[in-house]
Amino acid sequence: MAVTTDRDVGSRMPGDRGVWAWITTVDHKRIGMLYAVTALVFFLVAGVEALLIRLQLAGPNGEVLTADAYNQLFTMHGLTMVFLVVMPVAAAFTNYFLPIMIGARDVAFPRLNAFSYWLFLFSGLMIYSSFFVGGAPDGAWVGYAPLSEQLPEVVRMDYWAIGLNLLGISSIAASANFIATVLTMRTRGMTMLRMPVFVWMSLVVAFLLIFSLPSVSVGLFQLLLDRNAGFLFYVSAAGGDPLLWQHLFWIFGHPEVYVLILPAMGIVSEILPVFSRKPLFGYPFVVFSGAAIGFIGFGVWAHHMFTSGMGPIAEAGFGIATMIIAVPTGVKIFNWIGTMWGGRLRLQTPMLFAIGFIAMFVIGGLSGVTHAIVPSDTQQHDSYYVVAHFHYVLFGGAIFGYVAGVYYWFPKWTGRLLDEGLGKIHFWLMLIGFNMTFAPMHILGLNGMPRRTYQYGSGLGWDFWNLLATLGALVIGVSFLVFIYNLIVSKRNGAISGPDPWDGRTLEWTIPSPPPVYNFAEEPTVHALDDFWHQKYAEDDEGRMVPIQPVKGGALAVDKETGGDDDGEPDIHMPTASFYPALSSFGIVVAGFGMVYLPWGWISVGVGLAITLWGLFGWSLEPVTKEH
Amino acid sequence: MGLSACAGSGPQSAIEPQSPQAESINNLWLLVYYIAVVIFVLVMGALLYAIFRFRERPGDDRQPVQLHGNTALEITWTIIPAVILAVIAVPTVRGVFDMREVPTGDDVVNVRVTGHQWWWEFEYVDYTNAAGETLVTANELHLPVGREANFVMTSADVIHSFWIPPLMGKRDVVPGRITDLSFEPSNVTPPGQPIFGQCAEFCGLSHADMRMRVFVHSEAGFADWVAAEAAASSIPTEGPAAAGWETFNTVCTACHRATVAAEGGVETLGPEVTIVADGVTFVSSLAPNLTHFGGRTTLAAATYANTVEHLAAWLDDPPALKPMDPERNDIAAGEIFGMPDFGLDDEEIAGLIALLKVWE
């Protein structure tokens, strides 16, 4: 008999209510929601920053912003989008779905999971507080030395350097957590090659972060020492080397872009099969390509430095390595099209965004190949051409993919479907606005417009394309207003989805929408890739699918009597809520903040460390689960 | 990307090459671009075909064949892109090494470039001025047509990037290090239509306003320019220009250099800063050399036309015209973040303008 509670009619998430419940939650699903909402807010902030930039550049000799304000805005736009939007939104999906997709009830270290979230939130707020105390970081999100070392008495770039290090701690903790989860908590029968592609991509990303973050961390510490303690790592006059900063940054920075895109590719790899009613074409090749991209991604970093004077051997070597990475990327794209080929395509909103991802990413990928052509890159680098390239892959690619994920998984989070009509309006406005904004930037770059410039003169042939880009940005803004409206309205009044609104293939569609706190009443046993699909359909002689029985999805999961206490809920012990992860992360950020304002900041460092120690001790000494 | 075919032009355009080097880069770009267009059309074609052919229509109850993959196809679409890339790699690598060839010989015009926040300094090491020093100018580069120009470059402060798109791809200028660049201008620039260049590595407040103009002359025209530039400027003895000279000599020479014909002979006023990077010596200063400022078409690193109105506004309040941070200047340490507002009155400004007009 199915347990019918208000879960099934899409009301609030199960679990305790109230602010304190959310602060102390260690439930991976709630942590995923926290990441998602926080990332969305930062996205709107970074979007406003972008609109201001575009307003300033709408015409020549713009006077909307001063150069100082402009430099802060473009720096924070980049920093926010990379570290406070795209990475956290990937973390949101990974948090929520990785455990469920492998049949687990939570991640390996639930409190560490919460710690990662709170450290992300507090670090992001710390960096943004700089706007109110003298100005935000203004040295570009990549903070090249020696510019980032000039004027150490101005603390803007200290906020940036310390903030990034704190965010790095958050990411490393989360990565260790996800790796441990995937390697040790897969349910019975879930071999590695039966895991969904999204889980594979999250695993690759976790390894990328663990191996790349130390490089930028070292670079940032050296920068902080140069700025604040008279060290000379990047000072040529003393025998240091400004290019060392670039190497240390990009050894992180290049794998970082794969961190941004691979989870979105994973999401697309989940959506296409469901909405084509066919398996993912070439699953092992898609998985292996993702791993290959991650691995090769460590060997291409200096393609960001082709104009820095490294010498022809390095330039030729990195150029060739960069070309090589196009091959596994192409393999994925061809496999996605192969998935759609011969299928029965349902062009609902998640599918539209997934297809949009493919189209936009092809463009961004091709412009990326032109960057690998070193002589050509000496014209394109640091111009609007590269701005076009990375927005095509990060916005046309990653953002389209993550938005697809929202439309796809919103019913699982909330029990209700997002409105399909509004979704289509959002899609078309976003697609049109996006291309209006960024396609002209290829032309601007080829016509010699450099990036990171607060104004440009007239008579250079740039006026029309800049105006078009600004209008496109406004269209993008409108599309996101439609999206926000859809989220709000559908959360309240959207059509009830049930557990399996899309006729899905993976385990999250076997449990109620929204799921109970313990995910699975009984941990599933898996017999194949896309096990749920195979429980619903068999293949006939020609390989066509045949329904096994009339299935109301979810019946497979919820019809077990598992006994337990009086309310009919299964007797499953879940990790208890804890205050200490939030407390520890708060202490770390208080200490970091103190480091911006040395020497009197030592007080804050001391207080912060004390709070952290309190948090860590409490964390260590409390039991993982309280007995009822 | 299809739009770039109808990209149009401008004086700073990389796709309107004015040198064989820029043309070679542009040709390589076009080759790759056309290949990319073909790939784009094929891939998008397949995608759009799949969407239209296989989309679900009302009453459509097809059960698609559950194809899991096709190894032969995987191998094919791995190998073909790899081959295409291998083909493109050949001219790419060749281009990398070609860009590195340093031109030598008597015909080469050798220029040492020092990037500053926020202006460009050019030292013509093959030529001396009337004071017996190498010829130094700022922001406006003059070159002879058909002769290779070889640039050896460094920075006085942060990383900048030297970029004149119609003439060559960019190269960063790095403090404490040497980078180099060379190209051969193909065409004489028409009068009043120089080639435009700009700093292309974010360098702070006025990164957007660190621009250049390039004038390509005939052989005779270039010889004339060198001769005029090498001559000392006169010291006016009458009228507002003479008063301007007094102001110049007391206020401006703290940072700016000028080579003038003084009583005792030709001398260069203003601070000389020597920068040594990777064993190469650069003759530099704290601010642009103004010896023949009157002959320049632009001011403030090619951000404004060199008119009386702009010059008056500039001398009155430089940070109002170009974002700078001169409060942080430390002249003794050689750290300059722009030109301050010296609080000059209208008479002093008029005098300076008159003086600088004489200094053509």
Image (spheres, coloured by chain):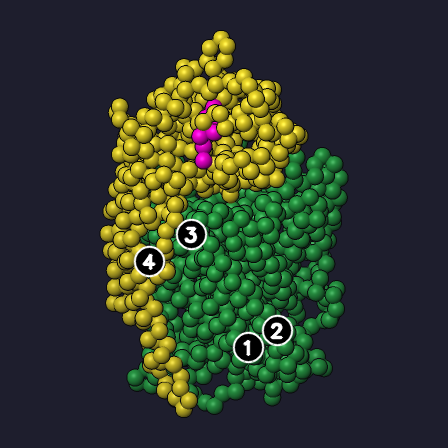
The residue pinned by badge 1 equals A422
Is there a contact, CB below 8 Å, between mark 1 and mark 3? no
Q: Position of residue B280 (x, y in %)?
A: 40, 23
The residue pinned by badge 2 equals A485
Residue stretch in magenta: B291-297
User: Residue at point 50% right, 13% down?
Assistant: B262
Q: Nearer the viewer, residue A111 or A411?
A: A411
Q: Nearer the viewer, residue B139 or B305?
A: B305
State how far apart marks 2 and 1 are (Cα). 9 Å
> Is B15 placed above or below B317 here?
below
Q: Nearer the viewer, residue A230 or A191?
A: A230
Query: Do discs 3 and 2 share a chain?
Result: yes
Q: Quadrant of the C terminus of chain A?
A: bottom right
Q: Position of residue B231 (x, y in %)?
A: 41, 20
Task: Specify the amino acid type for callout 3.
Answer: Gly
Indicate the chain on which mark 1 is placed: A
The residue pinned by badge 4 equals B5
> Closer to us: mark 4 or mark 2?
4
Instruction: Decide: few, some or many residues near mark 1? Use Cα within 10 Å; few <14, some 14-19, many ≥20.
Output: some
Q: Position of residue B194 (x, y in %)?
A: 38, 40
The residue pinned by badge 3 equals A461
Task: Specify the amino acid type for callout 1.
Answer: Leu
Q: In what element is the residue under mark 4? A: helix
Q: Nearer the viewer, residue B281 or A423?
A: B281
